[in-house]
Amino acid sequence: VQLVESGGGLVQPGGSLRLSCVASGSIRSIWTMGWYRQALGKQRELVARITSGGTTDYADSVKGRFTIPIDSAKNTVYLQMNGLKPEDTAVYYCHALATPMSSDYGVDYWGKGTLVTVSS
């Protein structure tokens, strides 16, 4: 199973960006998909995630500004980021808890990350 992110870049404070993450490969099922971020010198933290049943979870710092739409038919999750702040600057990683065809168990998968820089 591979996760490929896209959509990062440079944006001014107050602006918007949408990240995309496509899961591909021999997938039996996907249980959750989500986004984590890691700023320079800090630990990786959860930004938002969504379960296969549609339940969402957001970090307090992004509630009301970010949403996590998903297109289950395309195994694609998005991160819509509005009202961006300089403190949102980080490498954003896509994560999936999925069961591959070769297993009966869930496995954690990570993308390589995409850089989001919020600066004027």
Image (tube, grey):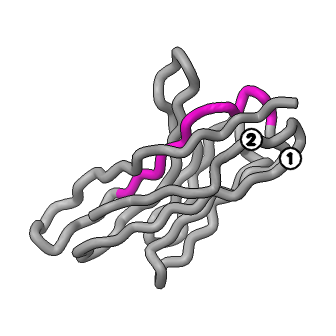
Q: Would you name the residue on which mark 1 appears?
A: 15
Answer with left or right where residue 56 lies relative to residue 84: left
State which quadrant residue 75 falls in. Answer: bottom left
User: Which badge, 1 or 2, comes first in the chain's sequence?
Assistant: 2
Whether residue 55 is in magenta: the answer is: no
The residue depicted at 11 percent of the width and 67 percent of the height is 103
Mark in the foreground, 1 or 2: 2
The residue depicted at 46 percent of the width and 64 percent of the height is 51
- Of residues 17 and 58, which is closer to you in this image? 17
Q: Which residues lie in the magenta part?
A: 85-96
| Residue 19 higher or lower than 63, as above or below | below
Instruction: Name the residue at the bottom extreme.
Output: 73
Answer with left or right where residue 48 lies relative to residue 64: left
Could you tell me which quadrant the N terminus lies in?
A: bottom left
**In the image, residue 21 lies at what x, y percent?**
50, 62
Mark 2: which amino acid? Answer: Leu
- Of residues 69 and 120, which is closer to you in this image? 120
Mark 1: which amino acid? Answer: Gly
**In the image, residue 104 lies at what x, y percent?**
12, 68
What numbered label is drawn on residue 10? 2
| Residue 68 higher or lower than 13, as above or below | below
